[in-house]
Every structure is written in structure tokens, then in C-alpha cells.
Amino acid sequence: MYRFTVQDMTCQGCAAAINRAINNADKLAQVKAFPAIRRIEVESALSSEQLLSLLSDAGYPAQLETTHS
């Protein structure tokens, strides 16, 4: 699972657009959006680089969050 910060995601409409952009490229992707904290969580066969590119192309540039073990 990937977590991204999406500063320009401010509402459910933005979240829906992000979900569509990702699902157009990976029909099996699961996207959870949290507009209040500007975060999405994505389970996808696509790489983080591919997802970042899709988000940018959709008008929602994002940053991959790093996780600490």
C-alpha cells in the first residue's frame, strides 16, 4: 500500500477525480481518500512512480509518504 499527500485535494469531488484517474489505469486498484488531511492510500499493481505520474496528469500533484519501521 502506498500513502500520498495530495495538497490540492480539498473535497470529495477531488477525491472522486483522483479515484477515477487511478482506476482508469488499474481497474483493481483500491483508493481510500481523506480530504480533511489531504491523504490518499492506494493498493495497486502500479508502481509509486506510475501513480505519482497519474496524479500529476490529473491535476493533483502528490508526494509519496515514507513509512518508518
Image: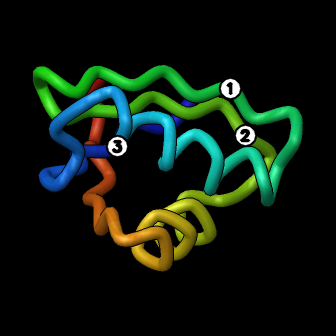
Q: Please state which amino acid type lies under the numbered disc 1.
A: Gln
Residue named by callout 2: 44
Left or right? Give the position of 57 relative to 6: right
Q: Is residue 11 above or below residue 27?
A: above
> Marks 1 and 2, how far apart in space?
7 Å
Residue that numbered label 1 is attached to: 30
Q: Which color scheme is applied?
A: rainbow
Check the picture and name the quadrant holding the N terminus.
top right
Q: Position of residue 42 (x, y in %)?
A: 55, 33
Q: Are marks 2 and 3 in contact (CB under 8 Å)?
A: no
Label 3 CA crowd tier, 10 Å (few <14, some 14–19, many 20+): some
Q: Nearer the viewer, residue 22 or 20?
A: 20
Label ID, residue 66: none
Residue 14's tag is 3
The three-letter code of the residue at mark 3 reads Cys
Q: Earlier in the sequence, mark 2 or mark 3?
A: 3
Q: Residue at x 37, y 36 (%)?
A: 13
Task: From the top left corner, tell me how far across and down residue 40 is, in percent.
Answer: 38, 33
Q: Amino acid at mark 2?
A: Ser
> Gap in Å between the C-alphas at discs 3 and 1?
16 Å
Task: Give the image location of residue 56, x and y in percent.
Answer: 40, 74
